[in-house]
Image (cartoon, helix red, strand yellow):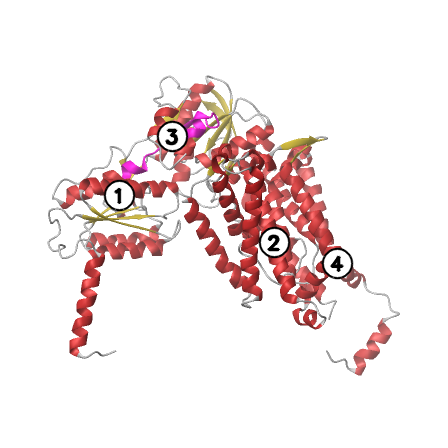
Amino acid sequence: MTTTPAAATAVEQFAPRRRRPLERLQHILHAHPSISPLLVLILAFVVFSAVTPRFASPNSLSLVLQQVAVVGALAVGQTLVILTAGIDLSVGAVTILAMMLAAKVAEGQSLPGILAVALGIGVGLLAGLINGALVTRVGLPPFIVTLGTLSVFGAIALLYTKGQSVQAVDLPDLLNWTGETFPVGEFRISVGVVLVAVLYLLVGYALANTAWGRHVYAVGDDKEAARLAGIRVDRVLLSVYLTAGAVYGLAAWILIGRAGAASPNAITDANLESITAVVIGGTSLFGGRGVLVGTLLGALIVGSFRSGLSLAGVDDQYRVLAVGLLVLLAVAVDQWIRKVKS
Amino acid sequence: MILPGGRRGTLLLALATATCLMSTACGADEGAGGDDNVAVALITKNSTNPFFVTMQDGARKAAEAEGVKLTVAAGKEDGDEAGQVQAIEDAIARGDEGILITPNGPGVNPAIKKARDAGLYVIALDTPPDPANTVDITFATDNFKAGELIGQWTAKQLAGKPASIALLDLFADKIVSVDYNRDQGFLKGMGIDTKDPKVNGDEAKTGSYAAGTYSIVCNEPTSGAEDGGRTAMERCLAKNPAINVVYTINEPAAVGARKAIQAAGTKDVLVVSIDGGCAGVQQVKDGLINATSQQYPVKMAELGVQAIKKIARGGEKPQTTGGLDFFDTGVSLVTDQPASGVDSIDSAAGASTCWGKA
C-alpha cells in the first residue's frame, strides 16, 4: 500500500469533486449490502404478481414462508460461518443427525418432548464443537473440516437409523408442534416460521449490536489484524461454529414438524441451498462483509422464484437457471464493491 | 522386496492359510457344484435403505435354509457403481456360482459381462439393467402394474366424479424407469391415455378417465422423501385447491403430501402410493394413505438364491414372465376400502407381508 505523490495530489483534488453516480451506487451498496437482494425481491414480487395473480395471495405467500423456513434457519448458521471467511458443508448432515437421534430416542413417547428438542440442539452443539475444534485447534481449513464431517455425521445418522424414518405418530407432540399453523389475518403462519423469525432477530441483533458481533466481522475481515487488536480469534471462531451447530439442531426440529416424519433422506440439497441464500443475500464469501437480513432476503428470493415460476406453469429448471445467474451476479457485485476499499 | 526362499515360502503358506480361514469353504472349493457349497454373492445398491436391508436379511435366511454360502456386499450409496464393480470382481475371484445384484447403473455392465464370461450366473433384483439382457434374468416388481392397480382402484372409488389429479413423481431432472413406470401405470389404470409410456407429463391435461372427466393439475418432483412430498403438494394446491386425487411415487412422499392436505384443510382427497413398506401399511391403517401397491423384496432374494442353487446343481434356468423381459415377483394392492373388480388385501394382511419396520 504505497502511495505515489501523484496519487496523493489526485486525492486532494478528489475531495471537492462530486462523485459520479456509479461511484455513489458503489458506496451505497458497500454501506448497505442488503440493498441489492431487496431490489431483486421487490422486482420478483412485481413480475410474478403481474404474471400470476395467485402468487401474491395470502395463501400462497404463507406457503412460501413455510417452505423457506428450514433453509432459512440453516442459512443463519451458514451466514455466521461464511462471515468468518469459512464455509460449512456439514449443514445437512448435522441437521439430519440431530433430527434422527432426537427422534429415535423419543420414539414411542419414551422421552418427554422438551428433552428430545434439547437433545437435538445438544447434538448440533456437539457437532459444532467438533467442527470448531478442528478449525481452531488443529488449524484445518473449514472447507476440508466440514467436507470430512459431512461424511462422518451423515454416515453415523444412516448407520444408526438403518435408513428408517420415524413417523410423526410415534413422536412426542412437542416435536411435531413446529408444523402447527395458526391464522394471522389472512395468512397462515406455522410455529416453525415464528421460531425462524425469532432466530433472525436474536442473531441479527447480536451481530449488529454486540462486541461479539463486531469480533465476528473483524475475524472474518482480517484474522491477523483482529489478533493484533487483542481479539481472541480462536474463541470467536469456536463460538461461531457452536452457534451454527445449535441453529442446525433447531432447524431439525422445524423440519420434523413440517415433514410429518423424521427421515434420514430429507433435505438432500441443504448445503447448496443454504450457501445460495447467503450469497444471494449479499454476504461476501471472503468474510467480514454482509448482514443477516440479506440472507433472509436471499432465502425468500429463492422461495419466491420457486413458487412464482411453478404457479406460472414454468419448468422448474428455469428456476435453477435463474438462481444460478443470481449467484453469479451477487458474487460479481461483491467483487465490484470490494474495489471501493482499495 | 526379496525374501530368502525359506521365508518367502513361509509367508506364502501363511497367506494361503489366512485366505483359507477367511473363507468358510476352506479347501472345499475345487469342482464347482460340490454337494453342499453353492456360493452366491448378493450385491445391493446400498446397505442403508430399508428395502435393501430387508432384501439382505431375506437372502441370509434363504441361504441358511438352502445350505448356500452367501456373501453380502453393497455400494456405498445409490449410484456407487465402482463399489459394486469391486464386489463383482471379488465374487469372480472367490469362485462363486452366481451373483444377485441390484445394479447402480450402466457402469457395472462390463463387470457383469466379465462375471458371465467366467461362468457365473447373474440375476438382477428389483432394478433391471439397461439393456435387460446384460444379466441372465431379472427378478423384479412390475412397477407399471403396481401403478395400474392403484389407478384402477382410484377410478372405481371416484365412481364417475370428476378427478383433479396431482402427480407427485420422483425427479424432474433425471429419467429413471421406476419413476415413469409407476406414474404412467397409474394413469393407464385410471383409463387415461399416457401418450409415450416412458415420459411423465406428456399426457393431455384434461379429458376423460374410465368413469368421468379428469384434469391433471401438476407433475411435481419429491425426491421420494417426506419433506419433498409436502412441498410438492403445497405447490399443486396453490395451483388448484380442489385436488381430489394424489398419486405418489412412494410412501414417504405420500406422508408429506397428506401433511400438506391436512394443513390446507381440504377434505375427501384420495392419496395412493406404491411400496408396501411396514410404515406405509401402517399409514393405510391410519387412513393417511388410501391404497398402496405392495412389492416383495424378500421374495426377490429368496427366488434368486434358489435359482442359482438349482442351476449350480444342473437344474433348469428360470424363465421371464409372459410379455415382460423380467420375472415378475408379484404385487398386491393394500387398502381398507376395497373396490369391486380390483383384487386387494387389507392393512392387517399387508402388515404380515410388509418389509422394513413400521
Left/right of residue B252 with respect to residue B114 in the rendered view: right
Assess disc 4: are there few (<14), some (14-19) or many (≥20) residues with their C-alpha within 10 Å of its C-alpha: some
Q: Amino acid at mark 4?
A: Leu
Question: What's the mark number on residue B192?
Answer: none
Q: Which residue is mark 3?
A: B293
Assess disc 1: are there few (<14), some (14-19) or many (≥20) residues with their C-alpha within 10 Å of its C-alpha: many
Which residue range is magenta in the image?
A: B281-300
Residue positioned 65% across, 53% down in the render: A280
Quadrant for residue B194, please give it: top left
Q: Most extreme residue toward the right, as rendered?
A: A16
Q: Are marks 2 and 3 on the same chain?
A: no
Q: Most extreme residue toward the bottom, as rendered?
A: A5
Query: Closer to us: mark 2 or mark 3?
Result: 2
Q: Which residue is mark 4?
A: A29
Residue A304 on image: x %, y %? 64, 43
Q: Are marks 4 and 3 on the same chain?
A: no
Question: What's the mark number on residue B60?
Answer: 1
How far, Cα to Cα, is label 2 from label 3? Answer: 42 Å
Q: Which residue is mark 2?
A: A244
- Look at the image and tell me in which quarter the C terminus of chain A lies: bottom right
How far, Cα to Cα, is label 1 from label 2? Answer: 43 Å
Residue A34 in view of the camera: no
* A178 up-or-down from B352: above or below: below
